[in-house]
Image: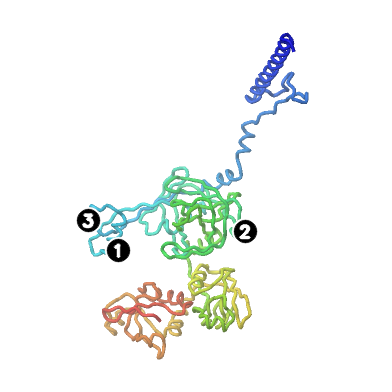
Amino acid sequence: MNNKTIRKRNVKIAVLIGAVLWGGFMLGAHAGRYLNGKAAEAISGAKDIFGQPIRAATPLTDKEALAIRRTPVVAAIEKVSPAVVNINTEKIVQRSINPFGAFNDDNFDRLFDNFFNQFPTQSYKQQTLGSGVIIDPKGYILTNEHVIMRASKVMVTLPDETVAEARVIGGDPKFDLAILKIDVKKSLPAARTGDSDSLMIGETVIAIGNPYGLNHTVTTGVLSAIGRSIRTDQGKVFNDFLQTDASINPGNSGGPLVNLVGEVIGINTAIYEGANGIGFAIPINRAMRAVADLIRYGKIENVWSGLRAQELTQQIARKLGADGGGVLISDVFRDSPASRAGLKTGDVVVSIDSAKITNLEEFLNKSSGYLVGDTAEIEYIREGDHKKARLKMVALPVDRADELAKDLLGLTVSGIDRTQQARYNLYSTDGVVVTKVEKASPAAKIGVEPGDIIRQLGGREIKQMSDFRETMLMISAQESAFVVVQRGANLYYVRM
């Protein structure tokens, strides 16, 4: 190939490259006009690699773009957010004065509180943050009990920055629920509640609250589990919680857990300090059933099943065909929910509402989580056969407490008045005084006598007859209980 031929070939290649570059430039220019939203008609003369005219798509309007961006999550948040409030509480805390002021350390101060509480104390204010959700336009707000526990002042901030002082209508630490009431001169937006009994594992959920004081923070996740039982660092056990991977941190407590329809399905709680990427919430159906009690009584009514249970030994378990564990029903009281459900002494309870029961602690924790009117499905073993019963919980029948005290403990007691003080030469007006002890009863066997004062029963302080009766019914499900007895100026700790 001679030089002239080579030069002609190079010229052709250069022309071809130039044409390609020019075509690319022209297409880029048209594409730029398209991206700027100015090409509503066909690009004149431009064709694709198949020779078809290139046409520009019609650009989205602002309204159309907004419709795409408003996802179900956004829509749900817009529905519920107006009903989510910030709760700020003020507590008066008493603390021993630390004589070693140079050690400015909270852990050191707590050490002095625990071991040197004979030192003078000083009062100071402590503030806590939490969340809540408006459940009634009249100003009723549902939150966690631990958010307002021991608070001397509770302030509520609405989404429109309105601030109002709230009254505590009622609270119950066992269920960690509380009701507040604010009085403002306007109708308030109330959240719509959903059905927490129809939840699906894996469905998207949204937590709204004020973690670390950051108002109206939103986190999303999925519903990870239902029916969870958790034990807090303080030893409390909470049953039937919802579990989610949506972040729930201090300050979120009391805020709503929401589904994609914009319905409240749970009340978030941050009581499980060891959680990492795990959040818990109280199912809204359970919470709303408790609201009536909180408004009417200021607390949630305790339930009574009418049976007593004890630990199941391996020997008894093998004999009754309950090698998998459970608890033994040691007594069923007449005319009680347990007797009406067909349960009998000697039955072995192995599960409650599908939750396996292996020991007495699990049985008592699970049983204590029910509300008046709830029905529990009991699976039990009788003579080697597995059976089921439906146990409907009722309110504590206070009128039966005196009867149970006599039957179970062998005690007859009375409130302390001037007559009883003079008769028994009593040193205290708190508690209830023993007036009669049945022969060969548990009380007689440990030496309890008329004139002794019951100061504590089952770990609860007894100040008057109403305390004793309520506690007596609550411990009636247990095989035994610790009792603090005062005789003269001395206190004795005994088990009955």
Quadrant of the image for the N terminus?
Answer: top right
Q: Label 2 vs label 1: CA separation?
A: 47 Å
Q: At which x and y percent is residue 72?
A: 61, 45
> Residue under circle 3?
100
Q: Amino acid at mark 2?
A: Ser
Tell me which label, 2 or 1, sits earlier in the chain. 1
Q: Label 3 vs label 1: CA separation?
A: 15 Å
Colouring style: rainbow
> Residue under circle 2?
198
Q: Amino acid at mark 3?
A: Phe
Which image quadrant is residue 356 in?
bottom right
Q: Seen from this angle, which residue lies furthest bottom?
A: 439
Q: Which residue corresponds to the image point at 61% horizontal and 42% vertical from the top-left?
A: 71
Give the structural element (helix, strand or loop) at label 1. helix
Q: Which residue corresponds to the image point at 45% horizontal and 45% vertical from the top-left?
A: 215
Task: Say above or below: 1 vs 40.
Answer: above
Q: At which x and y percent is residue 136?
A: 52, 53
Q: Label 3 vs label 2: CA separation?
A: 57 Å
Mark 2 surroundings within 10 Å by alpha-carbon count, few (fewer than 14), some (14 through 19), many (20 or more): few
Name the mark on residue 114. Answer: 1
Task: Say above or below: 306 vs 87.
Answer: below
Residue closest to the eye, 224 or 449: 224
Q: Seen from this angle, which residue lies furthest front?
A: 1
Mark 3 surroundings within 10 Å by alpha-carbon count, few (fewer than 14), some (14 through 19), many (20 or more): few
Q: Amino acid at mark 1?
A: Asn
Give the structural element (helix, strand or loop) at label 2. helix
Tell me which label, 3 or 1, sits earlier in the chain. 3
